[in-house]
């Protein structure tokens, strides 16, 4: 066993480099966009945990590392198979290296295979367990977000609803917003959907794209999307978007919620007097 551990240490840098290269070659999705230095650092952490377990004769280090990785990767939507693929590649590199080094020593190769199996199994179990628990937490948070968004959808008048948007609009949150908005339009049989952006923290090209897709989905249900509450920053961003800004500019955009409601009521043939609508 000690000979194997010594060989593992001696060949550590070479096997890390080989593993990183192979991960690049097979194009594991999660690692594809990772910079070379970050990829090597990730591989090194896994090899360091494996070495610690080899020296201790256990599986604690790898289990702890992969538990942390599982919780972290789940937050970023990384598939478990991507993580496991990278680990498998690394262990396979060591197996091939030991097959060459210990060609005349089957006991050393067998010792590695037994240790590798125990470490890999324990690590994969911890990874899967933490990943699933973290994903469940994410799903619960998404469900709560959907419920919160649904409560924000306010029918202002028969056929008119408003959805005040607050905070940052990520891709995932944009999908939630669209889902809630379409359900409300269908439920209330709305003709106009007012999207109030006055509470949106940042407005950039990505947010503009989300907004265009949401507006297109609203139209598919036969309703008219009306954007209200654009800030000066948002207006400047739209002006600088080129073709995307021109497309977004084709939407109905009004200064504030009152203007949006007035517009929708007028289009529906409802008179708007100088006082509150009765």
Image (tube, helix red, strand yellow):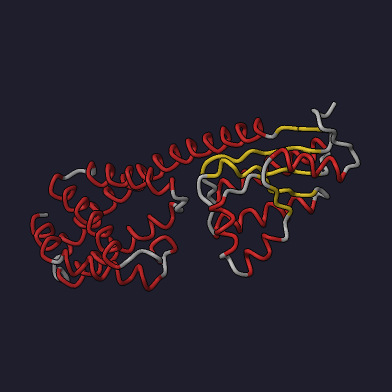
Compared across the picture, whether 221 is left or right of 236 comes to right
Residue toward you, 100 or 93: 93
**Residue sitting at x 31%, y 44%:** 122
**Residue sitting at x 65%, y 33%:** 152
For residue 164, which quarter of the picture? top right
**Residue sitting at x 81%, y 35%:** 188
For residue 212, which quarter of the picture? bottom right
**Residue sitting at x 72%, y 38%:** 258
**Position in image of residue 131 (x %, y %):** 42, 43
**Position in image of residue 60 (x %, y %):** 23, 41
**Position in image of residue 260 (x %, y %):** 74, 43
Residue at far right of view: 269
Residue toward you, 202 or 65: 202
Q: Is residue 216 above or below residue 36?
A: above
Residue toward you, 250 or 15: 250
Residue toward you, 232 or 197: 232
Compared across the picture, whether 30 is left or right of 198 comes to left
Q: Quadrant of the C terminus?
A: top right
Q: What number of labels is visible?
A: 0
**Position in image of residue 1 (x %, y %):** 12, 54
For residue 29, which quarter of the picture? bottom left
Residue at far front of view: 274
Compared across the picture, whether 115 is left or right of 23 comes to left
Q: Is residue 27 above or below residue 144?
A: below
């Amino acid at each position: 066993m000690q000979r194997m551990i010594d060989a593992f240490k001696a060949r550590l840098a070479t096997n890390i480099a080989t593993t990183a290269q192979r991960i690049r070659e097979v194009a594991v999705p999660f690692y594809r966009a990772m910079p070379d230095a970050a990829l090597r650092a990730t591989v090194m952490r896994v090899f360091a945990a494996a070495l610690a377990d080899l020296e201790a004769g256990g599986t604690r280090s790898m289990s702890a590392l992969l538990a942390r990785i599982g919780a972290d990767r789940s937050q970023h939507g990384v598939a478990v198979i991507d993580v496991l693929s990278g680990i498998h590649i690394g262990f396979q590199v060591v197996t091939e290296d030991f097959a060459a080094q210990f060609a005349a020593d089957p006991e050393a190769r067998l010792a590695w295979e037994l240790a590798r199996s125990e470490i890999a199994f324990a690590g994969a179990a911890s990874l899967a367990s933490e990943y699933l628990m973290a994903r469940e937490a994410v799903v619960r948070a998404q469900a709560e977000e959907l419920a919160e968004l649904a409560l924000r959808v306010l029918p202002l008048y028969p056929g008119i609803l408003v959805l005040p948007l607050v905070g940052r609009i990520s891709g995932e949150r944009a999908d939630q917003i669209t889902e809630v908005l379409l359900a409300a339009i269908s439920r209330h049989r709305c003709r106009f959907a007012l999207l109030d952006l006055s509470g949106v923290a940042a407005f950039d090209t990505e947010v503009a794209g989300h907004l265009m897709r949401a507006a297109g989905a609203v139209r598919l249900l036969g309703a008219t999307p009306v954007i209200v509450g654009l800030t000066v920053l948002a207006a400047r961003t739209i002006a600088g978007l080129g073709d995307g800004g021109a497309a977004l500019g084709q939407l109905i955009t009004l200064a504030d919620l009152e203007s949006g409601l007035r517009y929708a009521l007028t289009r529906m043939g409802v008179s708007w007097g100088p006082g509150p609508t009765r």
